[in-house]
Image: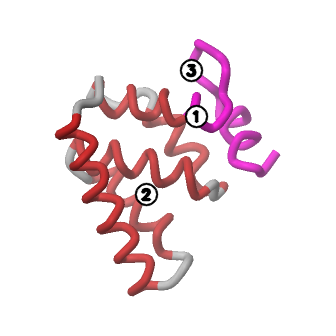
């Protein structure tokens, strides 16, 4: 379950990613979020999932699907919630094709 503390951490991570966007240009937030998703702390991976779901870049489809199988339960929960917020209604783990449709590429 997400707590006030975890929400504040996600907000701080959002601000960091937005700062990277302003410094590095529009193409970089996806690359930065993907990097955090693969190598970041639990809080960074959770936030990277949210950012990738909101951006809607096709490069995020497979990493978002993989986040549903992350070792950390909070990352998996965030990926599931992000998928539901973006319109994935299935209770089962969405496929890459499901995510591609939700992200506007299908």
| Circles 1 and 3 in contact, beta carbons < 8 Å | no
31 sits to left or right of 97 = left
Query: Which disc number belongs to residue 85?
Result: 1
Q: What span is colored magenta in the figure?
A: 83-106
**Image spot of residue 47 (x, y percent):** 35, 49
Q: Secondary structure at mark 1?
A: helix
- Residue at the location (38% across, 28% down)? 76
Quarter that holds the N terminus: top left
Of the residues under marks 2 and 3, which one precedes in the sequence?
2
- Residue at the location (23% across, 41% down)? 42
Residue 88 colored in magenta in the image: yes
Q: Quadrant of residue 15?
A: bottom left
**Image spot of residue 14 (x, y percent):** 35, 60
Query: Which disc number belongs to residue 34?
Result: 2
Q: Residues within 10 Å of mark 3 (few under 14, many from 20)?
A: some
Of the residues under marks 2 and 1, which one precedes in the sequence?
2
Q: Secondary structure at mark 3?
A: loop
The residue pinned by badge 3 equals: 93
Q: Secondary structure at mark 2?
A: helix
């Amino acid at each position: 379950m997400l707590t006030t503390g975890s929400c504040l951490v996600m907000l701080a991570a959002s601000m960091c990613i937005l700062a990277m966007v302003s410094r590095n240009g529009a193409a970089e937030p996806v690359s930065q979020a993907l990097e955090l998703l693969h190598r970041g702390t639990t809080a960074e991976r959770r936030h990277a999932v949210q950012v990738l779901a909101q951006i809607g870049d096709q490069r995020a489809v497979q990493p978002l699907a993989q986040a549903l199988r992350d070792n950390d339960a909070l990352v998996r929960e965030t990926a599931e919630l992000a998928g539901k917020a973006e319109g994935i209604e299935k209770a089962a783990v969405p496929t890459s094709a499901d995510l591609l449709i939700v992200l506007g590429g299908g």
